[in-house]
Image (spheres, helix red, strand yellow):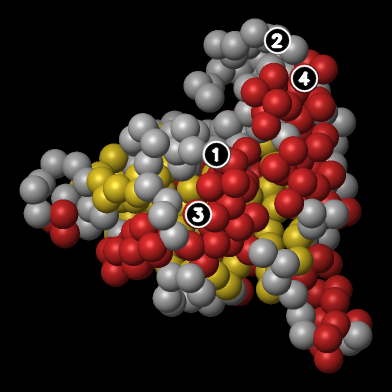
């Protein structure tokens, strides 16, 4: 059972030097802690790519280094197996992957930066790392999220996602600020309105802006359904790609929703970071592979 969701950037542990984004990630970690989770499932666009299949890491642990920050985490292998079962039961192509040792429980899988950076800011919990499959349709990614949500246990789902990669010079891609703004502004608006179903219309915009976020966000949408409230914590594009931080918490029962304390606590905790989360979409120099 998914008990919490998030959208988190992976533009290095320094987040391109953005204090606003870093403060938002610290707040995201606090909210994750409050959710009292047993494990975290991370959707990364930078893990192992298996053509036409979701790739679920079943190695006993993962380890990696980003910007001199080392991180090692254990895999929640029972949850990984349950997710594989649910994906296959839903006719979503999915494969178990591992690395090194032929005994998966002893294997240590490389931790890619797409998973490493969000996990760096979140509580140390067992994890399951999953790579989407862009060869599959957008609708299949939504169905994959629905399948993941059926896995047992109390876990959080993190969509590791950087957005359009054509904001400015400094990266390995062409520059198209108009395409970048169009995609990122649409994503920000959908998160603010808690209307992630609208992501299904953004395929052409994601392609034009060279986004690496749409597929993970659609899995998140499928998993959360209409049972969660969104909270945009920050958005910035300090370089050539956009980064967004958002938290998704279970919708309060109707009997609690009318209580002022219940409806304001989660947003007020982030203070001024939430109130001023949305910044003009612009860019400057740095480099990261999409």
Tell me the CA gap for discs 3 and 2: 33 Å
Q: Secondary structure at mark 4?
A: helix
Q: Is residue 102 left or right of residue 89?
A: left
Kindly indicate whether the residue at mark 1 contacts the one at mark 2 (C-beta within 8 angstroms): no
Label placed on residue 234: none
Residue drawn at x 76%, y 30% as measured from the top left: 183
Residue at the spot of label 4 = 179
Label 1 sits on residue: 137
Please say if 290 is above or below 79: above
Q: At which x and y percent is residue 4?
A: 60, 67
Residue drawn at (29%, 40%) of the image: 110
Marks 2/4: CA distance?
A: 9 Å
The residue lying furthest to the bottom in this view is: 255
**Drawn side of residue 115 relative to residue 215, left or right:** left
Closer to the camera, 170 or 133? 133
Which structural element holds mark 1?
loop
Spatial separation of the CA atoms under disc 1 and disc 3: 11 Å
Distance Cα–Cα, label 4 vs label 3: 28 Å
Between the residue at mark 2 and the residue at mark 1, the CA separation in whole angstroms equals 27 Å
Q: Which residue is mark 2?
A: 175
Q: Which residue is mark 3?
A: 144
């Amino acid at each position: 059972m998914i008990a919490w969701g998030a959208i988190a950037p992976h533009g290095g542990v320094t987040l391109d030097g953005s204090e606003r984004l870093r403060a938002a990630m610290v707040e995201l970690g606090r909210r994750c802690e409050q959710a009292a989770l047993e494990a975290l499932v991370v959707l990364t666009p930078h893990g192992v790519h298996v053509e036409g299949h979701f790739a679920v890491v079943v190695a006993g642990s993962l380890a990696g280094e980003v910007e001199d920050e080392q991180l090692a985490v254990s895999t929640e292998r029972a949850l990984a197996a349950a997710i594989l079962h649910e994906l296959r039961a839903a006719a979503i192509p999915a494969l178990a992957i591992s690395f090194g040792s032929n005994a998966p429980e002893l294997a240590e899988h490389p931790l890619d930066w797409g998973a490493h950076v969000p996990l760096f800011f979140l509580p140390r919990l067992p994890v399951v790392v999953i790579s989407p499959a862009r060869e599959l349709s957008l609708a299949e990614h939504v169905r994959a999220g629905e399948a993941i949500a059926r896995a047992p246990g109390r876990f959080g789902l993190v969509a590791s996602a950087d957005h359009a990669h054509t904001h400015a010079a400094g990266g390995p891609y062409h520059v198209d600020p108009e395409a970048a703004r169009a995609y990122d502004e649409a994503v920000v608006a959908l998160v603010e309105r808690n209307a992630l179903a609208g992501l299904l219309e953004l395929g052409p915009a994601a392609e034009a802006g060279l986004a690496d976020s749409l597929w993970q966000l659609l899995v998140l949408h499928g998993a959360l359904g209409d049972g969660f409230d969104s909270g945009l914590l920050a958005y910035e594009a300090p370089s050539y790609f956009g980064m967004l931080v958002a938290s998704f918490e279970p919708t309060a029962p109707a009997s609690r929703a009318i209580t002022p304390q219940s409806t304001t606590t989660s947003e007020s905790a982030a203070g001024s970071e939430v109130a001023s989360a949305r910044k003009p979409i612009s860019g400057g120099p740095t480099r990261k592979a999409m």
